[in-house]
Amino acid sequence: MGRWSRFFGLRETKSVGSPVPTGFDIFASLPTISGQTVTASSAMRVPAVSCAVSLIAETVGNLPVKLFERETRQALTDHPAYRLIHEEANPWTSAEALRVQITTDALLHGHGFALVVRDGTGAPQELHRLDPGAVQIDTDDFGEPSYKVRLADGTRAFTFRDVLHVSAFGGVSPVLLGREAIALALAFEGHIATLFANGARPAGILSHPGKLGDTAKQNLAKSWTEAHGAGRSGGTAILDEGMAYQAITMTLTDAQFAENRLEQVREIARVFRVPPTMIFELTRGTWSNTEEMARQFLQVTLKPWLATWAAAYARCLLSDEDRRALYAEFVTDDLTTTDTAARAAAYGQYRSMGAMTANEVRAGLNLPPHPAGDDLQNPYTTTSAAPQPPDAPPAEDDPTHA
């Protein structure tokens, strides 16, 4: 019996419904107008695509995920799912690394999958990444998915509870949706690489009124390079026999080529819904709008991915009863922190209004709790008189005392 049979022999189910072609964008070579073939691997050779994919996947992976109680909002650390989402997915893969892998799969192929390994009681024990090309999604008449997975010891069927499934918008990879923009970027890269591989173009043209033979041309080019080549620029050229030198300057077409390359970076940023400054296109970037775009990155780019991940965790790692009392949530505080002065002012306002205790502030600063730090009283207001118990008799010098 193979390894997967040992893990999943008792969990096998039957697939229903008609198959959904999830592997189309993985194996098909779709034509583009520019003639470039865009695949996941070729797209990642475009720096803008590689930067956008790694930015989204690594940010999703590095954000901590915790399991909270709905009523108290206290983190629950003794649940089997907590270790899988916060610490390690399996003995050789951390929870962060698995999120990076599966999010990358979803960005490049449209779907990312992980198989849930359970113990004899049905409690989740491990998560294992699945190759997107080895998974087929089946749906019934009501849209309930099931999965056929090609494993080393054969194809097996699993329910939606046993396959953690994260998909891109519409189940289609941004690489597939933006293949024309990516293909044009590849064409630009190929064109300029070929140009420089061929020695680029000359800096100027040396013309002669007469007709020169091949040997004379070679001797003239050699002597000109020796006199005015690299390291000798700025000297005085002496031309005879009616020769003339004409320098070649950047044309309007050259300027448009450079601008078009920048526009392709912006277009790829739109495909992945990433602010251009986040993938280092800083032409229109300023200090203020770069900070604003960082906030937009969280709200516009990351929030859908984080919501998809939280739902997938709850669906596969929590029972029906657990989902009524618990939920998984990403902690995004690191993405919303500002400079030290602004953080201090914000925490000060929260303390003064009684919204946070001193220990909650210390937790936000990664400091250990203080024994007297659980009081919500405003620390900025003091009174010289100690508060009296509600049932205590009035003091002798109290003017209201009869």
Image: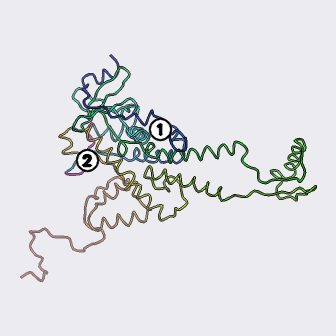
Name the spot of residue 97 as percent of width and height, x first: 42, 39
Q: What's the residue at 34%, 48% (across, down)?
A: 306
Relative vertical location of residue 341 with respect to residue 147 in this rendering, above or below: below
Name the spot of residue 80 as percent of width and height, x first: 27, 36
Residue 30's disc is 1
Q: Amino acid at mark 1?
A: Leu
Q: Please identify the residue farthest to the right as the structure is shown.
A: 241
Where does the magenta region start and end?
Answer: 71-80
Which quarter of the figure has residue 3? top left
Residue 361 lies in the magenta-colored region: no
Mark 2, residue position: 68
What secondary structure is found at the residue carrying circle 2?
Answer: strand
Mark before the other along the chain sequence, 1 or 2: 1
Residue 230's disc is none
What secondary structure is found at the residue carrying circle 1?
Answer: loop
Q: CA distance from mark 1 to mark 2?
A: 44 Å
Residue 99 left/right relative to 188: left
Relative vertical location of residue 209 with respect to residue 84 in this rendering, above or below: below
| Picture quarter with the N terminus | top left
- Check disc 2: other Cα within 10 Å, few if <14, some if 14-19, many if 20+: some
